[in-house]
Amino acid sequence: MKLSKLYMPTLREVPSDADIMSAQLLLRAGMIRKLVSGVYSFLPLGFRAMKKIEAIVREEMDAHDAQEVLMSAIQPREIWDASNRWENFGPEMFKLRDRHDREFCLGPTHEEYFTFMIKNELKSYKQLPINMYQIQTKYRDERRPRFGLVRAREFIMKDAYTFDADYEGMTKSYDNMAVAYSKAFDRMGFKYKVVQGDSGNMGGSISHEYIAITPSGESTIAYCNACTYAATDEVADALFTIVKKDEIYEDMQRVHTPNIRTIADLERFFDCDPSKFIKTLLVKKEDDSRVFAIMIPGHRTLSLIKLAKSVGESEDELLMLSEDEIGKLAGSVLGFAGPMGLGNQVEIIADERLFSITNAICGANESDYHYENVNLKASDYKVVDDLILVEAGDTCPNCGATLSIDRGTEVGNIFQLGDKYSKAMQATFLDKDGKAKHFMMGSYGIGISRCVSAVVEQFHDDYGINWPLAIAPYQVIITIVNTKVEAQVNAGFKLYERLKLSGVEVLIDDRNERAGVKFADADLIGIPIRVTIGKGIEDGLVEFSLRTDREKMEISIDETFEKVKLLLAKSQI
RNA sequence: CGGGGUGUAGCGCAGUUUGGUAGCGCAUCUGGUUUGGGACCAGAGGGCCGCGGGUUCAAAUCCUGCCACCCCGACCA
């Protein structure tokens, strides 16, 4: 493709509403454009990059017994009523009516429709298992669209659904998709981690999330550098120990601590290690039916999910007490809560590690007072082994190495659905024994457009995008330094035609611009292999370089051709 | 949905406090000089100042209603 003809409206300045690096670069590089909040279009270069990702996903799905279909995005209300999700999906669903006032939605996902279709067409165990997928535009009216392609209201998703005769079959299908996903994400080249999904309130159902490591990511994960352990921070086991010191138990003392509210204040006031402190947090159930006092090591953070599990409540219903409520309950202001004298209606829950602290310091439930030399007895409290959020440096529960913490973006997930939808929609088949049974299902998603931004988040520098060869919109860009010099133009186009003929995806910058403009654009759009044709052409030499490093090599056109072919061959593993 | 902020040329912004003929940089077009890291000179085009109502002789500017966009807030590809 000639750059003089390519629709590639690059911007020198960053559009003011682009909030993350990938959105800024994709917009500046003329790869995407925003129409309204959370709704983007793909221009030629951006679309090509996305199609590369699609192709990788398609190849891996096809290679793992999935068959591609294309289901309608527009769906009638009736099939959603069967699973109750017309109501339950909530305001995120884009709903519309036709001229006869019949209700429809734009598909946010397709469990219902696939199940509905299967139920009418698949009747025998002999036809199972079956795995179908599609790559299609999805619609979700997000509460707050942001981060460019990451949280869009219209986005491209690969979604797959498996139907099996029994539980074993379902897990096999699930494992098969897990392999396909790892292969696909490996080929895209970005760094990612597989974490166990939050089985949380639902209990039971198994799922995994594929998290691309990106500094702007919305989820925080803990992972081990030595083994494959990875989990979201709220769920990850926080393995750290407090070594019990062989100290003499001193007598408890009430200490006047005017205005000393935070752990940092306490450290300064008592001039001691933060592991000496017991932090007491007051949490209630939303409807005020239960109140909890949670004691954790002072320098750590409470995990609401872990708390919810240990008290058998839903995480969503647990709230931290407000300052007023603390005053009423504990007779103190924020910062002086402690386990003593809280009254019977408060359930006190303690992180196990507290009892290793000798002569601890905690709030006295009285404004401006703390206790020191506190030595709690485990037998007096409900003890839970782990209530806190994992931190970098904690021990890997799997192999004992040290954990790291990073932020990430969910680019894929796989889910064992069981018979949730087949039951709701009465989708059955006849098993060997002639009995009607519910399909055992799985669903599997990859955010295709989200992957585009994940790649850009991971592969860029100060000058622009730095596409991995496997998903670059073009593999090679030939820059003609001065289009007024015939020898440069001729040599450029000769190489261009030759590469094209041998199947290389190549751009040629034949614009009548100054060299600086062309180099800047080449950097910005991030084509991996660069050939610059300038003055050296008089001696038959061109410059060969890679986007990843700025080192240039002066070689002949023939050598250039061979080098390109070699690089491309190496990347096709 | 709650709180905060912003809407002026394709992009980035000034002008609004104190009402008086709509500006700057980049981009675009024409001519010329340039041509290895975002050139220079001369000229030109491009605006319902988010939309509606009001105040006023006069509104980008003041008042008011609405809309859009962005930021901060517990289910997600």
Image (cartoon, helix red, strand yellow):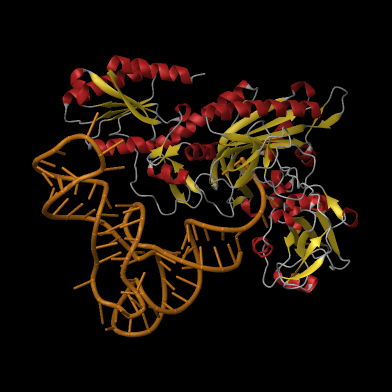
- Residue A446 place in picture, x, y as percent: 60, 36
Q: Quadrant of residue A132?
A: top right
Query: What's the residue at 27%, 34% (across, down)?
Result: A4
Q: Is residue A285 visible?
A: no
Q: Quadrant of residue A330?
A: bottom right
Placement of A454 over or under A85, stated as above or below = above
Q: Is residue A545 visible?
A: yes
Query: What's the residue at 57%, 28% (across, down)?
Result: A186
Query: What's the residue at 17%, 25% (across, down)?
Result: A486
Is residue B21 or residue A205 the one in the foreground?
A205
Is residue A311 or residue A104 the one in the foreground?
A311
- Residue B3 place in picture, x, y as percent: 56, 68
Specify whether A273 is left or right of A246: left
Is residue A41 or residue A534 the one in the foreground?
A534
Query: What's the residue at 34%, 35% (across, down)?
Result: A522
Query: Which image quadrant: the N terminus of chain A?
Result: top left
User: Which residue is farthest front?
Assistant: A248
Placement of A166 over or under B45, stated as above or below = above
Specify whether A106 is left or right of A20: right
Placement of A392 over or under A557, stated as above or below = below
Specify whether A184 is left or right of B23: right
